[in-house]
Amino acid sequence: MRKVDKNRLVLSRDGLDEILVLAPDAFFLRGLDDGASFASRLTIEGGEQASFIQSEGQVKLLEIDYTLPGNALDKSSPLHRWQVRMSREELEARINQFYPVGRLMDLIPKERGVSRRVTELEIRGSAGSEVVTGLKIRWALGLRETAFVIDREIDESGQVSHFDFSGRGWGHGVGLCQVGAFRLAQTGQSYADILKKYYQGIKIGKVY
């Protein structure tokens, strides 16, 4: 499966391509090693396995299985995809060590970079709000990466009771990915090819 735009996907099977149209109110499921869970959005890199239910020419339910090999170079890493679930109280206690926002109300990603990492996060609390940027987002939330999406569980009073973070990778998102470089080497790529992939526009030569 690969993505065409936000509403259409291409499903390849038996050598043929089929265009899938997502319904505006479609339900999403994210499949990982510990089972499937509902999600507010899904990331399609290409090569994932999909299950879906169609009605009247539109996909009403879509499940993406991230446990099988796909096109990403770091797919073999156990940290290629991860999920972290934290209660509001647990996350509130951690955040207040850095930013005194009081009772945690919500987390709002305000901006994302070209790699879709969160570059600006608004933390809303009963005592005020804070806008956190860059690596401070990882430190405040205690996550491995800033490439994540947030799903919320709402209690009977209409308040957020849990935050579910679904992300990929472990690092700062700058420079060379060790897992990706290893996979390229396994496919026979030279050190020069690997360096040029991660550091585009460079020239490799001797300085002595």
Image (cartoon, rainbow, N blue to C red):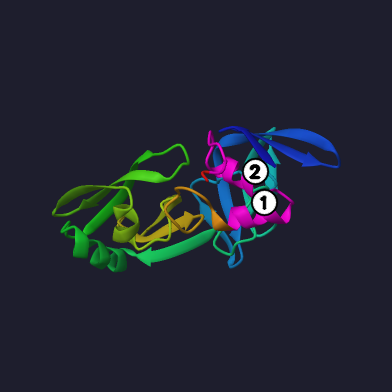
User: Distance from label 1 to label 2 (Cα)?
Assistant: 9 Å
Q: Residue at x 64, y 49 (%)?
A: 191
| Residue 36 appearing in the image | yes
Residue sitting at the far right = 14
Category of crowding for the residue at label 1, using alpha-carbon neighbours closer than 10 angstroms: few (below 14), some (14–19), many (at least 20)? some
Label 1 SS: helix
Rendered view: 89 above or below 176: below
Q: Amino acid at mark 2?
A: Asp
Q: Amino acid at mark 1?
A: Leu
Q: Is residue 31 magenta?
A: no
Closer to the camera, 28 or 33? 33
Q: Residue at x 13, y 54 (%)?
A: 127
Closer to the camera, 4 or 198? 198
In this rendering, position of residue 54 left or right of residue 32:
right
Determine which of the numbered discs, if any, sits on residue 184 in the image.
1
| Residue 74 appearing in the image | no
User: In the rendering, at what x and y percent does residue 38 appear?
Assistant: 53, 55
Q: Earlier in the sequence, mark 1 or mark 2?
A: 1
User: In the rendering, at what x and y percent does residue 87 appear?
Assistant: 35, 66
Q: Quadrant of the N terminus?
A: top right
Q: Which residue was labeled with disc 2?
A: 193
Closer to the camera, 110 or 71? 71
* Magenta region: 179-206
In the rendered structure, are the residues bearing label 1 and label 2 in contact, judged by CB atoms less than 8 Å apart?
yes
Of discs 1 and 2, which sits in the foreground? 2
Label 2 SS: helix
User: In the rendering, at what x and y percent does residue 115 appear?
Assistant: 48, 41
In this rendering, position of residue 191 left or right of residue 178:
right
In this rendering, position of residue 7 left or right of residue 104:
right
Q: Residue at x 32, y 48 (%)?
A: 134
